[in-house]
Amino acid sequence: MSAQDQIKETVTSNDVVLFMKGTKSMPQCGFSSRVAGVLNFMGVEYADVNVLADEEIRQGIKDYSDWPTIPQLYVKGEFIGGCDIITEMTLSGELDQLFESNGVTYDKDAADKIREANA
């Protein structure tokens, strides 16, 4: 199976996927850590893909999304964005709306706490 096929399979078979450097329990870069931290704090169930473990996946995900950086968040097969976009969406409440409209379970109180802490 090619890297592109693996990526497509992962993105379409999981409601939420984070392609990141490291894992959700041990991120290997600050940007990946920030996005994983938001998802973990909000109690979102998600698959994590460590791009450092496979160079073909690391390059392949950039080609798949036509986005040059890692991390990359996907919800219901759709590319949402990287660290800056996810941070903005979290603070604006857009990420909550995205999860709600896609039936993704998350902790609304935790999301509100993130916004309060950054107000």
Image (cartoon, rainbow, N blue to C red):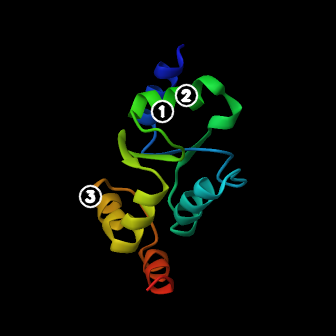
Q: Residue at x 64, y 44 (%)?
A: 21
Horizontal arrangement in the rendering, residue 23 relative to residue 86 (left or right): right
Q: Which mark is residue 62?
A: 1
Horizontal arrangement in the rendering, residue 102 relative to residue 83 (left or right): left
Q: Residue at x 67, y 53 (%)?
A: 29
- The answer to whether the residue labelled 2 contacts the one labelled 3, judged by CB atoms less than 8 Å apart, is no
Look at mark 2 in the image and give the residue it sits on.
Answer: 59
In x, y percent, where is residue 80?
37, 49
**Amino acid found under the numbered disc labelled 3:** Ser
- The answer to whether the residue labelled 2 contacts the one labelled 1, judged by CB atoms less than 8 Å apart, is yes
CA distance for labels 2 and 1: 5 Å
**Amino acid found under the numbered disc labelled 2:** Gln
Q: Secondary structure at mark 1?
A: helix
Q: Is residue 49 above or below residue 99?
A: above
**10 Å crowding of disc 1: few (<14), some (14-19), many (20+):** some
Q: Is residue 87 above or below residue 25?
A: below
Q: Residue at x 37, y 65 (%)?
A: 89
CA distance for labels 2 and 3: 30 Å
Look at mark 3 in the image and give the residue it sits on.
Answer: 101
